[in-house]
Amino acid sequence: MSGGSRRTARNRGRPLTRDGSDGRSHRDSRPVDAVRKVRSRDHGPIRLMDVSLKTLLWLGFGFVAFISVFLLIYNYHWESRHESPALRRLERVVTPLQAPKMMDLAQFQGEHKESLFWGTYRPHVYFGIRARTPQSLIAGLMWITIRNGQYFLRHVCQDSDDLSTYGWKDHNGRNYGRQLIVDHGLSFTTSFLKEKKEGSGFGGDWAVRLDLQNAKSIVHEGNEDTTHLFFYIADEEGNSLNVKKQVFETRDATLLAFGTRNDIGGWELHLDSQRHVDTHFSGFRTHHMHNLTELVQGTLAFHARRTGNLQLSDTIEESSNVVVIQIPTVVPAKLDIAFVSGTNMKDSLVDQRLHSLTGEILSTRLDEKQKEFEDKYLRYFKLKDKVDSELMAVGRAALGNLLGGIGYFYGQSKIALPQKNGDKFISYWPAALFTAVPSRSFFPRGFLWDEGFHQMIIGRWDADLSMDIIGHWLDLINADGWIPREQILGAEALSKVPEEFVLQYSTNGNPPTLFLVVRGKDVNTFYWHGRDNATTKELNPKTLTSGLDDYPRASHPTDEERHLDLRCWMLLSADCMHSIAELLKIENDVTEDYHTMVKQLSDFEKLNQMHLDDVSGAYYDFGYHTEKVRLRWHEINQGTVQKELIRETLEKPQLKLVPHLGYVSLFPFIMGIIPPESPVLEKQLCLISNRSTLWTEYGLRSLSKTSSLYMKRNTEHDPPYWRGPIWINMNYMILSALHHYSQEDGPYKVTAGTLYQELRSNLIRNIARNYHKTGFLWEQYDQQTGKGKGQRPFTGWTSLVVLMMSESYPSLQRRNS
């Protein structure tokens, strides 16, 4: 995630960035057609006198998986038209598991389904609303800010916007949220409320409160106190929308737009303001929702060039399915935007429903929802006597951001074909995913191993919501039990990912899910697939599938490797599967295999034979390894002389333990495999508490200072990632283990308890300090200064600080022998 523009992040692809100018001339003066060009990345300033109009790409959902396979066979002229074993394997990759769909279960239908229909399910934009349906009616907010005399249009969350802060202060994951955004001189709160009233259509109605203020102690640049807001509504299904700019005598709100859909019936969007606002609008016909920023930005610039006014054109294309409303307002201001559905039905009671979604009634309902959220937060996490009010506020924001970052996506993953086919791919079946996301600015999509950590929090807050998310993930299982580890579904998600990181590989799995497809060469040994054994650029070939990207492994990848962390994940997975079988009273060969695997993988003596260094008391990976590997500059003559960092091996690797102490070394401790009376536990506690290895005042380092690769770059473009910085998910798991051993009778109980209290205090204090100083939770923290590093806001697993505060830890079904 952090690092240069070519840096890969954990198991993620880093999004591209660019400066304000894309280097192209701005000569096309067509107002709409010219707006539709390349896929969006970061957005530059609005060019008022020199316009770049960009075209949008068309998004289609494609054919089902088997048709995709057929077309690929036809187009790429495979050697045989008869089914080969390779083709059958390929078909299985894109074939769903032949089992009932989780989301078809009765518990996810009816009232449950309707209650989650609308939500702030577009985490990649600063404020966006959609329904949980593949082609939804979507809504969102844009605004103009002025910096150094230039106009910038805000819409998609991106680090280059350099906002002072943004994020949900409260969010219950269902029908209420309150977000604070501070953009230089402008501070405003976006509140969301959803309600089901008599007369409304499926999913009910919703309201948005925009409360704008001048940011204190900041001089507002430019046009005094006037701010330009843009609220849009768009139909992904392509249904035509209508604009009617008039005030209804019987309603105290202004009708902005209206239309109809099969799922919710007729609908209307209204604006209620404390003072008169002179709105403007534009309507567009497009299928390219991922490029709405360019569409609006280009239209504003074109109109400004022609008229000298920074406003929309008050025109609407034929059969427009996007309507953008410009709301110029003087700050401070309070605006209410109300959406009502089912307006074409008899006795729809539109007037009453609008009244309840605006003004004083809306204020009262928002206050009630805020109090409900705060009370539930204190009640469910039992924080009243554990942390002070300042820390509780940080935990509440962490929880709110995690729940407010839940998104709904629909599309098809791209699965890489065998290597001989280069970058060609086949498509997974079209599928929906309802999921939390790690970071709204850099990773607004689903990641398999992150989601396990997310659900530790969400499951405690709202079990039904958590089960719904898990059900969506399980419906992505293919015939071989595999789930693509990174979910890039739909054009909006795709627009945030560089091309080289889009393809998913069916040979590679992610923790902590189904790992049986990645068995090792020997019985009960396991290794992560996907390491590059032919690389000449990486100091130590990355292991993206482990989630710990550049954490040092064996210098020379082979199938002889034994990865310690994967062995422990397998124990956890097998134990869970066996427990489920016992609960359901299932008895067959498969369940017996799980039971046998649990016994073998929890064998403490066998674990020590394979992975323990008796001298240091540390556990390590095993594989072909040498410490004498380096990166050295070489001159490459390709027409012009260039320098590249090339990997050199100065010694033949040997099969042995890989001597890099860090998070991986602690997995047997994390999983509780070590007996509480074992001297090995004492050595583990010594390694954890040693300031020369892992301990810092801010949390435990990912890699010991004694490692030869501590804080070493992996390539010219890859700074150290899991080679020193402090990561909250792993610290939480280590904290959980310390808590466990502090409760177990044994000679090291007191030591474990002391370390537990110190580590917990260090982690909570540092996360809170950074939040109060910067306004964000961070992806990782510097092991020397404690300063937040990497991406922000990162309210995925860093939100585990809530569980640290409440001292809530998972039961890992630890089995000691």
Image (cartoon, helix red, strand yellow):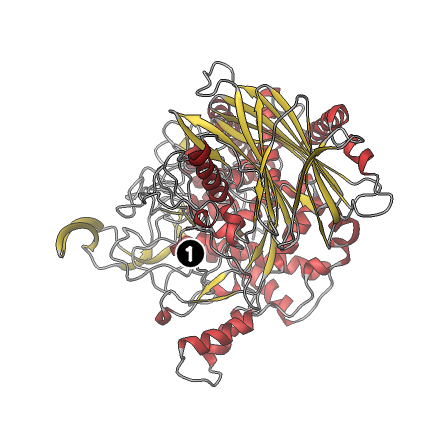
> Residue placed at 28% from the left, 62% from the top?
534
Which residue is farthest front?
Answer: 307
In the image, residue 699 sits, relative to residue 33, either above or below, namely above
Residue 180 in percent (x, y) is at 57, 27
Q: How many marks?
A: 1
* Left or right of residue 626, residue 89 in this image: right
> Residue placed at 66% from the left, 40% from the top?
173
Question: To which quarter of the image does residue 624 belong?
Answer: bottom left
Nearer-the-camera pick, 216 or 617: 216
* Left or right of residue 662, residue 277 in this image: right
> Residue placed at 41% from the left, 26% from the top?
147
* Left or right of residue 706, residue 750 in this image: right
Which residue is farthest right?
Answer: 347
In the image, residue 778 sits, relative to residue 569, either above or below, namely above
Residue 711 in percent (x, y) is at 31, 39
Query: Does the image show residue 89?
Result: no
Which residue is farthest top?
Answer: 217
Nearer-the-camera pick, 4 or 608: 4
Secondary element under disc 1, as helix, strand or loop, is: loop
Which amino acid, mark 1? His
Q: Residues within 10 Å of mark 1 (few under 14, many from 20)?
A: many
Residue wearing tag 1: 563
In the image, residue 787 sits, relative to residue 406, either above or below, namely above
Question: To which quarter of the image does residue 213 belong?
Answer: top right
Residue 151 in percent (x, y) is at 43, 30
Q: Quadrant of the N terminus?
A: top left
Residue 543 in percent (x, y) is at 39, 54
* Left or right of residue 605, residue 322 in this image: right
Query: Does the image show residue 119?
Result: yes
Nearer-the-camera pick, 93 or 342: 342
